[in-house]
Amino acid sequence: LSSPDLGRVAHRAIRLARLEAAASACARGGRTDDLTRITVEASRIASASERSDAYLRAHPDLVALSEDPEAIRRFRDDRSGWPGVRHSALAVLDAFSGDMHSASLESDRALTWFNWSLRERREGRSKGHKDLALLEAEAIFVQLLLGKAVRVDRRLSGLNDIYAFKIAADMLAFVDRLAKAKDASAPADKMIAAMAKCRTQSPVVIAAILERIEVTPDTRCRLLTRLAKL
């Protein structure tokens, strides 16, 4: 997500606003031919804007790191789709922006929606949201940064192993990205220390750490020993 890409987001927003104003003027003046051409052009730009909004929603960490005011504003103003998706993405955006208080609130809201969706699916009232894994990873990534390793571990321990591994791996990808973006290993070190301290009961968490995080030989040995015991 480069700066020129984000600049185009602002440019499209300005152009669309101008076209909307022109369309209103043409409608008032009865200029049907001009109105048709303006409407077609506005539709084309709006379609591009929707695609860019979808791209922004899918990369909240990159939006935060870009520090582009227009992209961040568009991201925060976007209320399309399922609320759980929005809250989990905002949690990551706030975490990468350094606002852990807001990130905590958004993470809790996202997990509330996820629990509701899983309950609805379990009780057969609806199919729930189609793919929760990445979204849930975004939410519990923030929980981990807040030092709530036990809560994260308990949540993953109660899930299907394959699904839990996907969540843990995606969560660790955010941890690794944050460490590299901030030029620090603290989040990764915190992750390993927290998991060791809470004596994780989920083998997939250890497997995900060994797969996604670079650790010292001594730490790897300790993690493998713990994994063997589990």
Image (cartoon, helix red, strand yellow):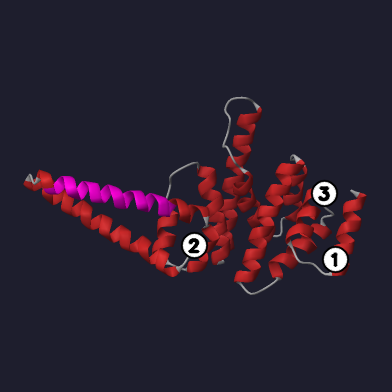
Query: Residue 106: x and y, percent?
Result: 56, 52
**Residue position marked by numbered label 1 in the rendering:** 219
Query: Residue 212: x and y, percent?
Result: 73, 60
Distance of mark 2 from mark 1, alpha carbons? 33 Å
**Residue position marked by numbered label 3 in the rendering:** 203
Q: Amino acid at mark 2?
A: Val
Q: Secondary structure at mark 1?
A: helix
Q: Is residue 201 left or right of residue 163?
A: right
Secondary structure predominantly adopted by residues drawn in magenta: helix
Q: Secondary structure at mark 3?
A: helix
Say if residue 146 shows up in the picture. Answer: no
Name the mark on residue 63. Answer: 2
Q: Is residue 162 left or right of residue 219?
A: left
Query: 140 or 165, which is in the foreground?
Result: 165
Say if residue 113 shows up in the picture. Answer: yes
Q: Amino acid at mark 1?
A: Thr
Task: Name the N-terminal-most of marks 2 and 1.
Answer: 2
Task: Name the N-terminal-most of marks 3 and 2.
Answer: 2
Distance of mark 3 from mark 2, alpha carbons? 33 Å
Q: Crowding near pointer 2: few (<14 within 10 Å), some, many (20+)?
A: many
Name which residue lies at 83% across and 59% down: 196
Q: Is residue 101 magenta?
A: no
Name which residue lies at 22% across and 51% down: 20
In magenta, the rendered stretch is 34-53
